[in-house]
Amino acid sequence: MSKKGRKRGQLAVMMVCAVVGFLLAAQLRSVKLSGAADATNAARLETLQSLYNELMDQKDGLESQVEQLQSELALYRDQAASGEAGSQALKAELDQLEITAGLTDVEGPGVTVILEDSTSSNVTGDEADYLIHDSDLLSVINELRSAGAEAISLNGERILATSEVRCTGAVVTVNGRRYAAPYIIFAIGDPDTLYNAMTMRNGVADILGQWGILVKVTSSDLLLIPKYNGTIDYQYARSAVQGEGEGEG
């Protein structure tokens, strides 16, 4: 073989070695990146599992707290019921406060409002225009309150002054729980007044109907609204002592 032939052979071998080396290096780098990604995902899963376990422990603790407070409340009620006229008045006041605070199941006449997303053709190009939002639900709830509703629930969740109703993606969160349409609202109060408030011309149901959102309102002789299933922890608000804070600017 001539010198030129040997040089070409050596050059070819060197090129093959270079290509093989490059491929090996790329493969090793890919393995390292894959290993790092797996490690990151594993760490994330471990963190999420830890957070989940922590939240479940908190939930169990709150449920135990609710059960304890309910037991204490039942004891106070029994003591008040076994007393004299003054205790009977105290029991009646306690019953009223429980209803106001949403701490007991209530029943009575009222209306049922069912809201479903629109099935109309999308002419605006924005699908969100045809879905029920938290603002729509709050408009209905506020209308019912203005009409004298004494107790309201949304998909079985008792609505209190502290209840949050807010959009979280395609669903709505109520009292920390997520619900999708249809949304069913119970409101206890005078059925005629509540019905008229919801169905009046240019009212909330009329406006939502313009977007094709179905709002069905029916009167009922008897509705059952469950008590608030949660805890209320006041960290800053407390009862004001008479005279306290006077003179402060």
Image (cartoon, helix red, strand yellow):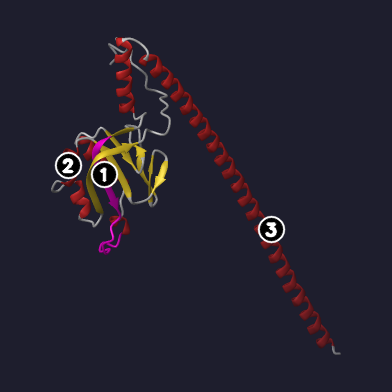
Q: Which residue is the site of mark 1?
A: 112
Give the Cα distance between marks 3 and 1: 60 Å
Which tag, 3 or 1, sits closer to the chain's start? 3
In reply to whether residue 123 is colored magenta, the answer given is: yes
Amino acid type at mark 1 = Thr
Q: Please state the extent of the stretch shown in magenta in the rendering.
A: 108-126
Q: How dense is the environment of label 2, judged by Cα within 10 Å: few (below 14), some, or many (20 and up)?
A: many
Vertical side of 243 occupied by 170: above or below = below
Front disc: 3 or 2: 2
| Position of the N terminus by quadrant | bottom right
- Secondary element at tag 1: strand
Crowd rating for badge 3 (residues with CA inside 10 Å; few <14, some 14–19, many 20+): few
Residue 163 colored in magenta in the image? no
* Residue 142 vs residue 226, the one in the foreground: 226
At which x and y percent is residue 178? 41, 45
Q: Identify the secondary structure beneath mark 2.
A: helix
User: Where is mark 2, residue-wise?
Assistant: 197
Q: Secondary structure beneath disc 3?
A: helix
